[in-house]
């Protein structure tokens, strides 16, 4: 009996490349106790794992370092880098140095100009003679300095602005004009029957209260009912009284000019009803209606 021949056919398997095999070969990292040789720690690694982990760690380290330098003060320690504050200080010092150079140049020019006088090269008498010669050659036309008719009319209008002269029918024919102490709305008129010998003018707090004419302050102080009060004596026996002021600007004995601020609008005293001026005008010891003498509009 013939024994059959058995043929084994082996399939050709492609061997992995040497580079891939080197990268994927596993290695075991073991940590042993030196005295007992007992295994403490072990780790399986390949070259590919080492390269990947090393690359990721390097990228993270570079990123953190970049952010640390860019957003902290460590960047100022990098050679060639200048901080913003340092740039501002440098610019400011540059401007100051330029300004000092300009001042120094002006001072040098002044010194050069005055040096001949200080050293005696130019005598002071020579300067006086030059001034005298210039004054001799200068002709002043005084007629041109006189105001024209138009200028005189304009000045008269300005002087009479906000003023109202006493009526022409006044028996004493006093040549006096009164200036409105303050502009505003009249809330209460003069009424002798009700013993209100004044007018009340509403104005904003702090508005200047002005003297109605030239005169002397005979009273300047505080009263419980009328608050800060100031009284001015004028010519021809006229007296003006200003009550409920917020502040007094003149003292007793001061001389004031017409239209000069002597107080400010306020609301002081027990009888006040708000920021306003309680204004009284007296003549020869009797109260008179201020609206007959002053234009408050």
Image: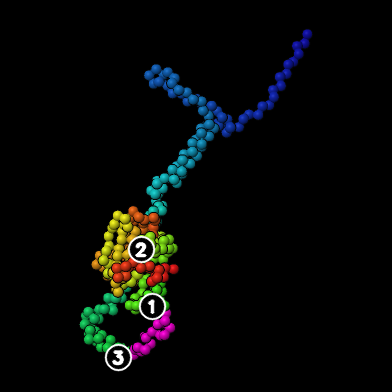
Image spot of residue 152 (x, y percent)? 40, 82
Discs 1/3, front:
1
Instruction: Residue under label 3, please give it.
Output: 136
Q: Is residue 201 visible?
A: no
Is mark 2 in CB contact (under 8 Å) with mark 3? no
Q: Looking at the rendering, which quadrant does residue 202 occupy?
A: bottom left
Residue drawn at the location 49% of the way across and 25% of the way down: 43
Find out whether residue 142 is within the magenta segment.
yes
- Front residue of 107 and 151: 151
Q: Which corner quadrant holds the C terminus?
A: bottom left
Q: Looking at the rendering, which quadrant does residue 291 occupy?
A: bottom left
Image spot of residue 86 (x, y percent)? 38, 54
- Front residue of 253 and 132: 253
Other residues around mark 1 within 10 Å, as few (<14) / some (14–19) / many (≥20): few
Image spot of residue 76 (x, y percent)? 39, 49
Residue drawn at the location 27% of the way across and 62% of the way down: 220
Image spot of residue 242 (x, y percent)? 33, 63
- Residue lying farthest to the top in this orientation: 1
Task: Specify how the rendered protein is coloured.
Answer: rainbow
Task: Name the dominant secondary structure of the magenta segment.
Answer: helix
Residue drawn at the location 69% of the way across and 24% of the way down: 11
Discs 2/3, front:
2
Instruction: Residue under label 2, please give it.
Output: 197
Instruction: Residue under label 1, please give it.
Output: 169
User: For residue 202, which numbered disc appears in the image?
Assistant: none
Please tell me how many numbered marks the rendered image carries: 3
Q: Which residues are magenta?
A: 139-154
- Front residue of 189 and 227: 189
Q: Is residue 181 visible?
A: yes
Q: Which corner quadrant holds the N terminus?
A: top right
Residue drawn at the location 53% of the way across and 26% of the way down: 26
């Amino acid at each position: 009996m013939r024994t059959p021949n058995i043929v084994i056919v082996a399939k050709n398997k492609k061997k992995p490349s040497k580079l891939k095999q080197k990268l994927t070969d596993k290695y075991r990292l073991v940590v042993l106790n030196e005295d007992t040789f007992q295994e403490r720690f072990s780790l399986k690694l390949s070259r590919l794992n080492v390269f990947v982990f090393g690359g990721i760690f390097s990228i993270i380290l570079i990123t953190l370092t970049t952010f640390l330098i860019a957003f902290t003060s460590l960047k100022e320690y990098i050679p060639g880098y200048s901080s913003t504050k340092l740039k501002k200080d440098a610019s400011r010092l540059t401007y100051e140095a330029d300004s000092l150079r300009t001042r120094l140049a002006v001072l040098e020019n002044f010194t050069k100009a005055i040096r001949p006088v200080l050293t005696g090269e130019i005598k002071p008498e020579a300067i006086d003679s030059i001034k005298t010669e210039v004054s001799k050659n200068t002709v002043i036309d005084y007629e041109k300095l006189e105001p024209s008719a138009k200028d005189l009319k304009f000045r008269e209008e300005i002087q009479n602005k906000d003023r109202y002269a006493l009526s022409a029918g006044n028996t004493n024919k006093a040549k006096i004009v009164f200036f409105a102490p303050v502009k505003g709305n009249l809330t209460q008129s003069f009424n002798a029957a009700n013993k209100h010998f004044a007018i009340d003018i509403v104005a904003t707090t702090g508005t200047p209260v002005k003297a109605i004419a030239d005169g002397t302050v005979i009273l300047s102080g505080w009263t419980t009912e009328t608050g800060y009060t100031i009284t001015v004596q004028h010519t021809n026996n006229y007296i003006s009284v200003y009550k409920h002021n917020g502040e007094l600007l003149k003292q007793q004995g001061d001389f004031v000019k017409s239209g000069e601020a002597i107080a400010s609008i306020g609301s002081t005293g027990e009888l006040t009803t708000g920021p306003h001026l309680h204004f009284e005008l007296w003549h020869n010891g009797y109260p008179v209606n201020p609206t007959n003498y002053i234009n408050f509009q």
